[in-house]
Image (cartoon, coloured by chain):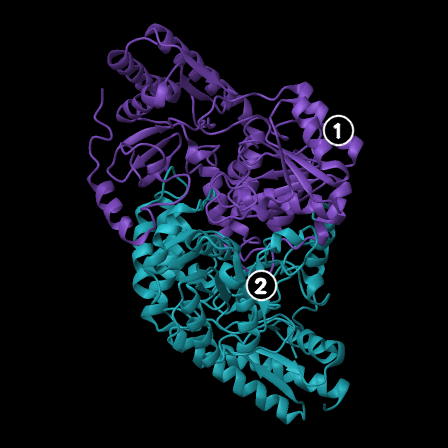
Chain colours: A cyan, B purple
Amino acid sequence: MTSAAAVKSADVELTRRAAKVVPGGMYGHQAIRNMSAAYPQFFAAGEGALITDVDGNEYVDLMCSWGPVVLGHRDPVVTQAVRTQMEMGDCLDGPGPVLVDLAETVVDVVTDADWVLFGKNGTDATTACLTIARAHTSRSVVLVARGVYHGAAPWCTPVPAGTLASDRAAMGYFDYNDSDDFDRAVEAAGSDLAGVMLTPFRHVEGEDQDLVDVEFARHVRRRCDERDALLIVDDVRCGFRLAHGGSWEPIGVRADLSAWSKAIANGYPLAAVTGQEALREAASTVFLTGSFWMNSTPMAAALATIRRLGDIDGVSLMRRAGARLRAGILAQAADNGLTIAYTGPDVMPYVTFSGDVDRERMTYFAETALRSGVYLHPKHNWFMSCAMDDAVIDRALRGTEVAFAEVRKRFGPN
Amino acid sequence: MTSAAAVKSADVELTRRAAKVVPGGMYGHQAIRNMSAAYPQFFAAGEGALITDVDGNEYVDLMCSWGPVVLGHRDPVVTQAVRTQMEMGDCLDGPGPVLVDLAETVVDVVTDADWVLFGKNGTDATTACLTIARAHTSRSVVLVARGVYHGAAPWCTPVPAGTLASDRAAMGYFDYNDSDDFDRAVEAAGSDLAGVMLTPFRHVEGEDQDLVDVEFARHVRRRCDERDALLIVDDVRCGFRLAHGGSWEPIGVRADLSAWSKAIANGYPLAAVTGQEALREAASTVFLTGSFWMNSTPMAAALATIRRLGDIDGVSLMRRAGARLRAGILAQAADNGLTIAYTGPDVMPYVTFSGDVDRERMTYFAETALRSGVYLHPKHNWFMSCAMDDAVIDRALRGTEVAFAEVRKRFGPN
């Protein structure tokens, strides 16, 4: 067992300073108060499948910065595209030619895209989809699955502090993969149903993941068609990782609108909305803008990322890495007499220990893995990247092997 | 008269391609359908106070990318900071040390900041202020001045397409600088008044600008204190340009919360919320996050920008440039027997021709200035940058001199 994460002095010092000038010490999904105090809060570097914290501890990064890093940290092709674009222009009085190159590439690659527009945050994209759906249909109600994350805006944030009931006045809720409950929500919306927003599968922090039931997806598509309502696929977390042309491309269920971000530019700030031809007019009437939405360098990064993912068949590489990780972890759990649930697609897996009250086993597992050089999250799905070759996965598995043995030693079999 | 903007073939071709893959051909505030068809849509490069469109036409950039560019395009100090940060890490599993350095610097520089947190869009910052105010007060109503821009989210967008009345259910409105109308709105909110959001002065597209009446600002502050409501200054457009420590620092009216973006990182995507100590707890309870909110390169850009603005006294440089531009333009107008209104602070001026029905004169003025190598907007305020030395302003004035003469020739005196 290595001593990674044993040294934490620089992190402690930065954390002490941050506590004075940042509310709660840190904000957002990467705040370690949401994870475990054993975790470092601050990072210094990333390279390929590895990250290094501010104390010099190196980890195999199974979180991929919570999704954005899809080719690997500091992918040389993307970095070069960014450097080249920086030599020209970035934030100007209008977009650069790269916007058009990127838009054509997205429309070419994404099955359901006849057009595209770009923002910065995933929440920009999901909110724009909601607004475009309402503009197109002149109706109000948008249905989403209970508990599913669509962003941090008042209409969708999982934390209600500071939001109002009126922010969610026209939202309806149903259980993912439950056609009967979905139909009930559709009936409740009546003639005011503007659309339905769905993630490609059910990925909810702290819960085992559910793949989409293809019959459910087809049912939703059918109901939307019957009601002239729109089907919006929130591909922010899954896009360009589950499938190259859209996460529901393999199951053949068409999206009217799709929201993208995270992996689209390998970590550079970009989001996108794509849509079918019928939505083009509505999309042009909604005011969608931001001070940096036309910046060229994130677009250059996205163009390089999408092309590279196509060139190397990135989805297949990530599936291979994910399958190797799954097989290794399931074997290690079994060897230690531990029962785990390994849920979701291989490229975005989630692991829980059966009967793990208060997540004690998983927290200890994650902390031990961390000390063994593997950065993974105890209650959020992990992500594969194209930089994870067999050697990287085997290195990760050497860390999880230690972690499983430690869990077995401390808690016994479950 | 030069022939700048005479050549437009690359722009025409990109525009043709964009029309196929982008709704309406282009979206957002930089879409030239909102300006004049004479304008180029696409830009290739920027350097200092100059921008170059995709056909190689060079302009003095009086728009500064609509605000973000405050030191000048591709400022070498900022570019080097970004390059250095890129050699380390950008989008990792947590923030880098630069977040702490930047947060300390903001808290040090901004008079009303005891803490800070960072997002990507100006709308992220204004929305967070709204939410934090509601979380802190457990009340709903936020008052804003009629017609004033606070972002593109459903609660504040100037274009209602796709939004619902419920998105604005808890908003109240009053006339800027009108204490009586403000008091009426306060009374209407009653015991449910959470806060008031104000821009440092009244800058509304298509309207002459109004500087803030200091007595009005003090009146709002007093009423907020009486009602235990919060005063939120939306410094997204003015911040780091009107004054280094906050746009209302010179008038001594305290903000409880402030929203920042645009100029904070000289064009790199960053926004910020700052607040007083009393708001720290509420700010830590609201869920504020985005996939790229912890990215280090925009923070490195911001740190370099804010330090550089301090080192060179950027505000004074921009005031000097703005005063020179104003004096020159007023003289040129008078020389041509043309009556104009030159409103707003010198660093963010706005020009209209008196009695200019349908904006015919201003549109022609802007188009002629464009052909003479000056990029300015016919119905939006302009921005000064620190790259605008006397020679740049004189170059701009040579273009506006031609434009005034052409307006006089075509329309006669007004």
Q: CA distance from mark 1 to mark 2?
A: 39 Å
Residue B194 location in percent, x, y? Answer: 72, 40
Q: Quadrant of residue B5 in the image?
A: top left
Residue B335 x %, y %: 34, 6
Q: Residue at x 40, y 12 (%)?
A: B328
Q: Which mark is residue A172?
A: 2
Asked whether A13 or B18 is in front, the reply is B18
Residue where numbered disc 1 is placed? B223
Residue B150 point in image, percent of width and height: 55, 38
Q: Is residue B245 visible?
A: yes
- Pick whichever, A136 or B11, lies toward us: A136
Mark 1 falls within which chain?
B
- Label 1 amino acid? Arg
Residue under the point 48% across and 83% down: A323
- Please state which of the two labelled residues, at mark 1 or mark 2, is closer to the viewer: 2
- Tell me the tag on residue A177: none
Q: Is residue B267 left or right of residue A173?
A: left
Residue B347 lies, in percent from the top left, at: 50, 23
Q: Amino acid at mark 2?
A: Gly
Asked where in the image residue B353 lies, by quadrant, the reply is top left
Taking the image as drawn, is residue A382 in sight?
no
Are the residues flagged by discs 1 and 2 in contact, CB closer than 8 Å?
no
Q: Is residue A241 above or below residue B17?
A: below
Residue B95: name its quadrant.
bottom right
Q: Quadrant of the C terminus of chain A?
A: bottom right
- The chain ID associated with circle 2 is A
